[in-house]
Image (cartoon, helix red, strand yellow):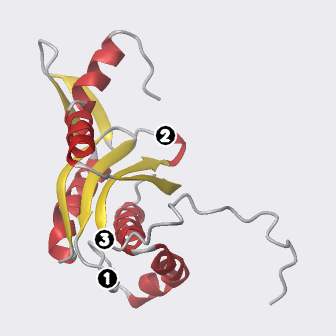
Amino acid sequence: MTDRFKNKYRILSSRAPWHDYNGGIYFVTINTYNRQRFFGEVVDDGDCHFRMDLSEIGKYADECVIKMESLHDDIHVPLYQIMPHHIHLIIVVDSPSIVETSHCDVSTEDDRLKNVQMQTIANRCGRLSLIISGFKYAVTFFARKNDISFAWQSRFYDRIIRDVDELNHIAAYIENNVPKWGCDELNGINND
């Protein structure tokens, strides 16, 4: 195959080139397309006590995060938060092995075959990419199956967590994301 564009339009990976992503602790953020609020809204239960009121697709995304550990015996998700247009997760990848990704609710072989090219790319990007692509695929599949308007941003953000202090800082950020979002909205700060 000739490369008619000579890599001129190739988008470089946002992953760290010095790390294989097959083991480690990661802070991951997955955004929806154009930051659309597909997953629900932050609501005030009174006295500035905020919580996420998940939409149907938000509830399914929550189920898929919960199922991640049972689908992948080499990962742990000790903390996560679904927000209106993004999801924060801390993901611990224990094993350097790469195995086929299981999906939350995939029922036909045709659907798996459509995803082969993306899985091939994800295999080269390490275990973390396989896990995230499987999760994104499962949520997208559910949305299409249930005629729900939904789309992901094409990439995801990750940070390799290097020490306990950084882990604690990120955990506090995730735990305070909903109250901060709610207070910002009360004060007229745009979270989009």
Residue 75: x, y in percent?
21, 69
Give percent across and percent down for residue 115: 49, 79
Q: Nearer the viewer, mark 3 or mark 2?
A: 3
Query: In terms of depth relative to the viewer, which is nearer, 8 or 165?
Result: 165
Q: Is residue 28 visible?
A: yes
Identify residue for label 2.
35
Q: Residue 72 shows which numbered tag? A: none
Q: Secondary structure at mark 2?
A: helix
Judged left or right of residue 182, residue 115 is: right
| Quarter of the rendering containing residue 103 | bottom left
Q: Which residue is mark 1?
A: 107
Residue 185: where, in percent of width, then height?
A: 35, 17
Q: The disc labelled 1 sits on which kind of residue? A: Ser
Image quadrant occupied by the N terminus:
bottom right
Closer to the camera: disc 1 or disc 3? 3
> Would you name the residue on which mark 3 appears?
23
**Could you tell me how far apart the alpha carbons at marks 3 and 2 are, in whole angstroms?**
29 Å
Q: What residue do we see at 58% from left, 63% from top?
A: 13
